[in-house]
Image (cartoon, rainbow, N blue to C red):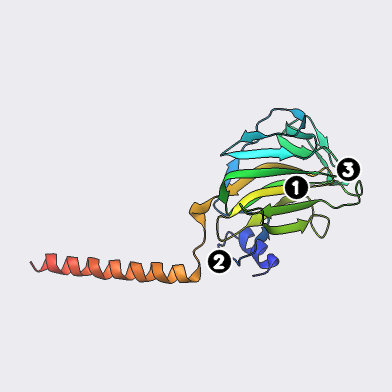
C-alpha cells in the first residue's frame, strides 16, 4: 500500500493491514493524546520524561513545553499550547518510547531556507534501525504528520533541522495493532470452532 493510500485510509478512519515499512499518515485511529507539560523551558537538551514513558533529548538547546510564542517564518506562529521546538537551524530532538508503539502523529511546523539541510521526521526501531524518514520540505505542509505501522516497533521518533516544532501529540500502542492476513485466518478459524462448540453444547442441553 503506498503512502497516499495509507493517508486516505487513515483520514477516513479505515484500518488496513500495512506493509513492513512505516506509512506516513495525517491521522491515527485508536490513538491516545499525550500532553506536553507546560514547563516553558528553553535551551533544554534533556533527558526529560513525560507522558507514558516518553523521553525527550536534543542535540542542541531546544524549547520544551513552550507556550509563550514560537515563530517558524513562513511556517507560521504558535502560542498558548505547549510545544517542543528545535531552537536551531541544524540539529535534532528525539522522542524515545519506554514501550515501542505502532503509530505516532503530532501537529508539526518548520521554517525553510535557514539551513542547507531540510527538516525531516524519522522513525527508528529498538535497535536503531531506520523505519522511515520523510523530508518535510518535499510536498508537505504544516499540519498533523506522523507514521503508522502494523506492528508496534517504533521505538523513537526524531525531528531534525529548520527549527522544527511539534504539539498535540497522539500515539497508538500495540493493543490496536492490525493482525496480519495469516493471523486473521487463525482468528476466524478459532471463532468458527468456538461457535460450533457452543451450538453443540446448546443442543445437548436442549435435549437432555
Judging depth in this view, the residue of 23 and 21 nearest the camera is: 21
Which quadrant is the C terminus positioned in? Answer: bottom left
Q: Which numbered circle lies on residue 73?
A: 3
Judging depth in this view, the residue of 71 and 91 nearest the camera is: 91
* Residue 110 in the image, given as x and y percentages of width and height: 82, 46
Residue at horizontal 82 percent and vertical 51 percent from the top:
119
Is the Cβ of the residue at disc 2 closer than 8 Å to that at disc 3?
A: no
**Distance from the alpha carbon under mark 2 to that under mark 3:** 38 Å
Label 1 sits on a secondary structure element that is strand
Q: Which image quarter: residue 184?
A: bottom left
**Distance from the alpha carbon under mark 3 to that under mark 1:** 18 Å
Looking at the rendered image, the disc whose residue lies closer to the viewer, 3 or 1, is 1
Q: Residues within 10 Å of mark 1 (few under 14, many from 20)?
A: many
* Residue 73 in the image, given as x and y percentages of width and height: 88, 43
Earlier sequence position, callout 3 versus callout 1:
3
Q: Which image quarter: residue 24?
A: bottom right
Residue pointed to by mark 1: 159
In the image, 197: left or right of 181? left
Judging depth in this view, the residue of 30 and 51 nearest the camera is: 51
Judging depth in this view, the residue of 130 and 120 nearest the camera is: 130
Earlier sequence position, callout 2 versus callout 1:
2
Amino acid at each position: 500500500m503506498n503512502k497516499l493510500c495509507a493517508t486516505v485510509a487513515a483520514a477516513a478512519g479505515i484500518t488496513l493491514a500495512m506493509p513492513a515499512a512505516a506509512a506516513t499518515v495525517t491521522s491515527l485511529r485508536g490513538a491516545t493524546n499525550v500532553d506536553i507539560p507546560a514547563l516553558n523551558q528553553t535551551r533544554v537538551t534533556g533527558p526529560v520524561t513525560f507522558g507514558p514513558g516518553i523521553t525527550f533529548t536534543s542535540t542542541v538547546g531546544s524549547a520544551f513545553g513552550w507556550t509563550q510564542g514560537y515563530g517558524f517564518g513562513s511556517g507560521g506562529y504558535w502560542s498558548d499550547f505547549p510545544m517542543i521546538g528545535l531552537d536551531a537551524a541544524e540539529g535534532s530532538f528525539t522522542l524515545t518510547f519506554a514501550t515501542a508503539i505502532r503509530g505516532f502523529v503530532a501537529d508539526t511546523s518548520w521554517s525553510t531556507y535557514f539551513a542547507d539541510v531540510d527538516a525531516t521526521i524519522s522513525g527508528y526501531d529498538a535497535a536503531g534501525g531506520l523505519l522511515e524518514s520523510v523530508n518535510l520540505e518535499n510536498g508537505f505542509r504544516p499540519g498533523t504528520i506522523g507514521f503508522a505501522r502494523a506492528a508496534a516497533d517504533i521505538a523513537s521518533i526524531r525531528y531534525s533541522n529548520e527549527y522544527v516544532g511539534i504539539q498535540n501529540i497522539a500515539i497508538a500502542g500495540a493493543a490496536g495493532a492490525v493482525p496480519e492476513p495469516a493471523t486473521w485466518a487463525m482468528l476466524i478459524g478459532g471463532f468458527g470452532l468456538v461457535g460450533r462448540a457452543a451450538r453443540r453444547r446448546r443442543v445437548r442441553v436442549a435435549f437432555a
